Image: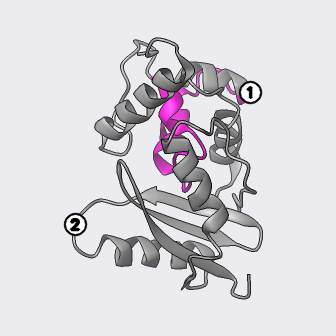
Amino acid sequence: MSTPAAFSVHPTPIGEALVVVTDRGLTFLDVLDVALGAVDGALAEVTRALRTAPEPDAGATAAVTTQLDEYFAGARRRFDVALDLGTVQGFVRTALERIFEIPYGEVWSYAEVAIAAGSPGANRAVGSACARTPISIVVPAHRVVRSDGSIGEYGGHPERKRYLIDLEARVSGAPAAV
């Protein structure tokens, strides 16, 4: 990639996804709200976080978007792209690294992620990490649920979380976990 960061907007069954990559890997993936200006607002946020403006380049994001398509088609259970988590630090990063380990088609509670991250009792902090992840779907925050089994808000879009959980249950042949 010739620019420090590149982006594309890619259609998915749950909405348009903004995909941003750097030379180190995927750094931002978010399903955008349909509001006018959503791409511009998200790009402004990414520009602040990266301290550089991503340039449009679908070729640079092709490895990610191809794998997204395979995931939504039920042909991919694990993403094989480098991740650039340089915009997240501390416990948020640790929690996201543990979330990345949740197997396809399974769910863990916020408490289970907190324990795996070495901070038993940090359930709310795990919830904050899920809400603040710059990389959705590939870092499967949708696989983290409340201890009572309810799915939670997923950035204000529980229908997206339900779709992803149901997709994985259908593909894996297991009953929906929640």
Residue occupying image coordinates x 50% and y 73%: 8
Asked whether 138 falls inside the magenta stretch, the response is yes
Q: Residues within 10 Å of mark 1 (few under 14, many from 20)?
A: some
**Residue 55 location (% of width, % of height):** 56, 86
Near-viewer residue (25 or 113): 25
User: From the viewer's perspective, is 62 left or right of 14?
Assistant: right
Please name the amino acid that badge 1 sits on.
Gly
Near-viewer residue (170 or 151): 170
Colour option used: one colour
**Residue 34 location (% of width, % of height):** 25, 62
Secondary element at tag 2: loop
User: Where are the magenta residues, as a range?
Assistant: 117-145
Quadrant including the C terminus: top left
User: Which residue, given by chain and number where applicable, does mark 2 sit on?
Assistant: 35
Secondary element at tag 1: loop
Quadrant including the N terminus: bottom right
User: From the viewer's perspective, is 16 left or right of 111?
Assistant: left
Would you place residue 21 above or below residue 81 in this image? Answer: below
Count of number-bearing discs: 2
User: From the viewer's perspective, is 45 left or right of 121?
Assistant: left
Residue occupying image coordinates x 66% and y 26%: 103
Asked whether 47 falls inside the magenta stretch, the response is no
Residue occupying image coordinates x 29% and y 59%: 33
User: Within the image, what quadrant is residue 9 found in?
Assistant: bottom left
**Residue 13 location (% of width, % of height):** 36, 48
Q: Mark number for residue 118?
A: 1
Question: Which sits earlier in the primary sequence, circle 2 or circle 1?
Answer: 2
Please name the amino acid that badge 2 sits on.
Ala
